[in-house]
Image (spheres, rainbow, N blue to C red):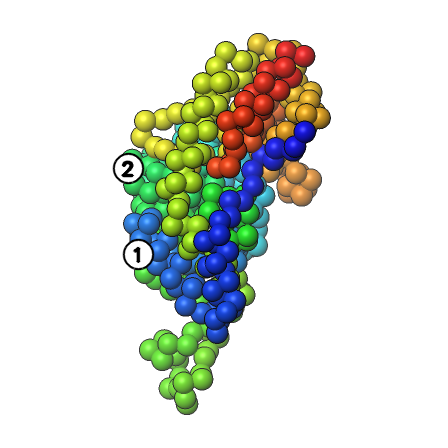
């Protein structure tokens, strides 16, 4: 019996040829493939700037810095995410706090956020940046978030690592609402460059700062140099930056993959629709559907409904893995990790995120998943839930 992973990359002959073309060229890095990928991504996402980086964690770090995060400032994010959504602020010396999730969307709760903002304003502890997370590919409540940002004066850094191809109010995620948006191209993501990320923004100054930060804080443009250049080889380090650059090999793969994003997205939608139908009637809570947004369907995450089955998540997980089906769990709430416990967070701080985690199970979802494989997943899950 073959193993069915929860996700896997989708690589075509065209992708391979695109990478081979770079291998045969003069540039393996810092060449023309990177700006070509950036321009295509910006066009696809209806935004003037897309800045390619080595991975999404680097993108979150740079965006936090570019938005002004630093010592004495506060950054709030969702506890239902991967560690990078919070770690990025700590890299900048800022203080991290969390906002509980909406149990329906599993995204940051606007009611919880507004309540926390009211309290923070009264104590002069408002955040400088809020990082909402588009969990599983479902865009967060961007319109409401923008209204709160304008009222309370914080910047929005959208973590869209799951959401390449998603849309909100008929616009691509990353095009509007947020001050900056970060995408991931990890191997299991919808578009992959093996490792890699992208930051989109409409802010010209923010884009310039992001480009400078990703390459050691250097500038080469004569118009930006502080001293008259002796010759064309001159560069200046003006701020402390990092080596967070993407290679041309990665960019070529990403550009090739981006060309079939709509096809990949349709395949994921079809699989998610079929899961909805096949899982109907089982003791599960399925992902929510909302009329004003389209999920990218990076994950199909269900919850074990303890009111309708005595089987625990651990028991179901073990049964599925024993049947060679690679279910997974997304995510262990960040605030419960030992590192964050040492910062003062405790279990019980964000009950909705903890309740979701206790029941969560991510089912296999990727474009190459066949109907027969999906049926096997569902049949095995049905048996596991029945005990």
Q: Nearer the viewer, residue 325 or 94?
A: 325
Find residue 291 and report its horizontal and vertical position in percent: 32, 27
Specify the quadrant that holds the C terminus.
top right
Residue 128 visible in image: no
Name the residue located 56 percent from the left edge and 41 percent from the top edge: 8
Residue tagged 2? 170
Name the residue located 49 percent from the left edge and 52 percent from the top edge: 13
Find residue 252 and report its horizontal and vertical position in percent: 45, 59
Q: Secondary structure at mark 1?
A: loop
Residue 291 visible in image: yes
Q: Residues within 10 Å of mark 1 (few under 14, many from 20)?
A: some
35 horizontally vs 312: left or right? left
Find residue 200 and report its horizontal and vertical position in percent: 38, 53
Name the residue located 65 percent from the left edge and 21 percent from the top edge: 316
Q: Nearer the viewer, residue 246 or 225?
A: 246
Q: Which mark sits nearer the N-terminus, 1 or 2?
A: 1
Residue tagged 1? 48
* Dot 1 and dot 2 residues touching (CB under 8 Å): no
Specify the quadrant that holds the N terminus.
top right
- Residue 82 — which label? none
Name the residue located 37 percent from the left edge and 42 percent from the top edge: 262
Kindly report the distance in space between the C-alpha atoms of the residues bearing marks 1 and 2: 18 Å
Q: Residue furthest front?
A: 13
């Amino acid at each position: 019996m073959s193993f069915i992973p929860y996700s896997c990359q989708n690589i075509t002959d065209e992708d391979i040829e695109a990478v081979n073309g770079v291998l045969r060229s003069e540039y393996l890095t810092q060449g023309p493939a990177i700006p070509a990928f950036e321009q295509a991504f910006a066009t696809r996402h209806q935004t003037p700037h897309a800045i390619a980086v080595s991975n999404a964690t680097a993108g979150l770090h740079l965006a936090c810095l570019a938005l002004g995060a630093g010592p004495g400032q506060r950054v709030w994010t969702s506890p239902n995410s991967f560690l990078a959504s919070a770690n990025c602020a700590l890299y900048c010396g800022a203080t991290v706090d969390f906002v509980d999730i909406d149990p329906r969307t599993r995204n940051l709760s606007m009611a919880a956020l507004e309540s926390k903002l009211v309290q923070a304003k009264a104590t002069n502890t408002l955040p400088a940046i809020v990082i909402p997370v588009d969990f599983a590919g479902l865009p967060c409540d961007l319109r409401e978030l923008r209204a709160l940002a304008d009222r309370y004066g914080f910047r929005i850094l959208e973590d869209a690592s799951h959401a390449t191809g998603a849309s909100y109010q008929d616009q691509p995620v990353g095009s509007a609402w947020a001050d900056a948006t970060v995408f991931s191209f990890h191997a299991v993501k919808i578009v992959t460059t093996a490792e890699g990320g992208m930051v989109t923004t409409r802010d010209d100054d923010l884009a310039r700062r992001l480009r400078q930060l990703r390459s050691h804080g250097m500038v080469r443009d004569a118009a930006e140099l502080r001293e008259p250049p002796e010759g064309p080889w001159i560069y200046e380090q003006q701020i402390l930056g990092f080596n967070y650059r993407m290679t041309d090999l990665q960019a070529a793969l990403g550009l090739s993959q981006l060309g079939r994003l709509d096809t990949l997205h349709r395949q994921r939608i079809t699989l998610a629709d079929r899961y909805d139908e096949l899982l109907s009637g089982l003791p599960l809570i399925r992902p929510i559907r909302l009329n004003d947004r389209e999920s990218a369907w990076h994950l199909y995450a269900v919850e074990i409904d303890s009111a309708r089955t005595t089987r625990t998540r651990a028991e179901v997980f073990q049964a599925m893995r024993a049947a060679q089906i690679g279910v997974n769990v997304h995510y262990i709430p960040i605030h419960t990790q030992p590192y964050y416990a040492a910062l003062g967070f405790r279990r019980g701080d964000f009950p909705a995120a903890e309740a979701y985690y206790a029941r969560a199970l991510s089912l296999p979802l990727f474009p190459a998943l066949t109907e027969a494989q999906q049926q096997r997943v569902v049949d095995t899950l049905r048996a596991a839930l029945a005990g």
